[in-house]
Image (spheres, grey):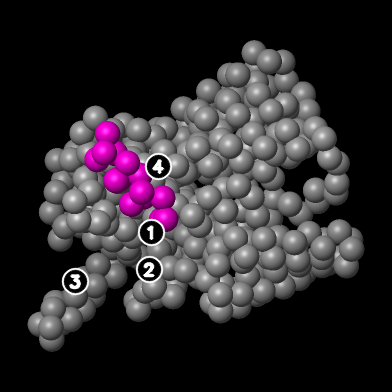
Amino acid sequence: MTLTPFETLIIICMVTLGTMLTRFLPFLLFKGTKSKNSYIGYLGQVLPYSVIGLLVVYCLKDVSFTNPPYGLPEAIAILCITILHYWKENTLLSIGVGTVIYMFLVQTVFI
Amino acid sequence: MRENIKALKAAFPHTIPVFTGFTFLGIAYGILMNSKGYGVGWTVLMSLMAFAGSAQYVAITFLTTVFNPVYALLLTIMVNARHLFYGIAMLDKYKDAGKVKPYLIFGLCDETFSIVCSTEPPEGVSRSSFYFFITLLDHSYWVLGSAIGGLLGSMVSFNTKGLSFVLTALFVVIFVGQWKSQQDHKPAVIGVVCSVLCLAIFGSSNFIIPAMLAILAVLTIYHKGYVKDKKLIEEKA
């Protein structure tokens, strides 16, 4: 533990507060909106797909493609996950195999 | 009571993928926390209160440097800014949830969102209790998984390098699943392209907010075409 118990508790509260702000805000802001065909309704339909794309990029934000290993472990693991998930559509299998491949690559092949 | 059991039975099958994912992610989180010297109690408290996978992983960095609560708050908001979009997507479905609505919103994490946005309750099961049990089950898996990880972490030690890749793997899996289920790939492509461009322009520590704005802008431009396409499809039908 780097922080004291009191400091740790404060950090946990901050993470909770920050998360809850982002979760509750839309419901407080757009209380009266109801039409499915409204602009907000449209955003509600398409955003889920865009946001997951953003999340994938977010996870890879610190990967360097100009320095060794040139993002190869990530690329190989993601390729395996994509193929496996397209084929079997088993979430645990895809996540488990993908992670094990990645760990193997960064621990033994691309050190 | 019987109503509740019915809703729980209807909700459970939908949460099985999250059960597997969260057990894995939660265990990894508990082990990571443990490797930084934070025991199972802290891990469980964090999982119970924040219930936000990626923010909790990022929070490990707040717990292992100099105490800075304001920075922790701001970075959490940045990391979780995507939840603003989830809320917008669920406005309609959660509209009449009544008493459980605050809990539903509290528990609207990535994985819960990915289920509730794509499933409807079966006939005879109330919408609010169906979504309530999905949220409650997911929340329990997460807390339980991280507790197991926290306990395991103090017993076994192994090379955890690369373990946090489970998070990337999870989102790739959700992305592939959505891609398969949708015919219109434009929203997904817009999300990836805007994010990559903003990452290249603004750098890794500042790109989330610009990327969200860029996604909003492109989706707004695409709105007209989307409405037209939908009308064409409806006319054909």
Between residue A111 and residue A62, name the one nearer to us.
Answer: A111
Q: Do the CB atoms of the residues marked 3 and 1 lie less than 8 Å apart?
A: no
Label disc, if present, on residue B187 of the rendered structure: 2
Measuring from the top left, give residue B102's x and y in whole percent: 31, 31
Q: Separation of disc 1 and disc 4 at Cα?
A: 18 Å
**Element type where label 4 sits in the image:** helix
Q: Do the CB atoms of the residues marked 3 and 4 lie less than 8 Å apart?
A: no
Between residue A88 and residue B230, name the one nearer to us.
Answer: A88
Amino acid at pointer 4: Thr
Residue in view at x 45 percent, y 64 percent: B191
Q: Which quarter of the image is occupied by the N terminus of chain A?
A: top right
The answer to whether B104 appears left or right of B165 in the picture is left
Query: In this picture, which residue range is highlighted in magenta?
Result: B1-14
Between residue B167 and residue B210, name the one nearer to us.
Answer: B167
Local crowd size for mark 3, using a 10 Å CA cut-off: few (<14), some (14–19), many (≥20): few
Residue in view at x 80 percent, y 32 percent: B154
Of the image marks 4 and 2, the number of the one nearer the N terminus: 4
Q: Separation of disc 2 and disc 3 at Cα?
A: 14 Å
Q: Is residue B154 magenta?
A: no
Local crowd size for mark 2, using a 10 Å CA cut-off: few (<14), some (14–19), many (≥20): many
Amino acid at pointer 2: Pro
Residue A29 can be seen in this image:
no
Q: Nearer the viewer, mark 1 or mark 2?
A: 1
Q: Separation of disc 1 and disc 2 at Cα?
A: 8 Å
Measuring from the top left, give residue A64's x and y in whole percent: 73, 62
Q: Is residue B4 magenta?
A: yes
Which residue bears the numbered disc 1?
A: A48
Judged from this view, the residue extending furthest toward the top is A6
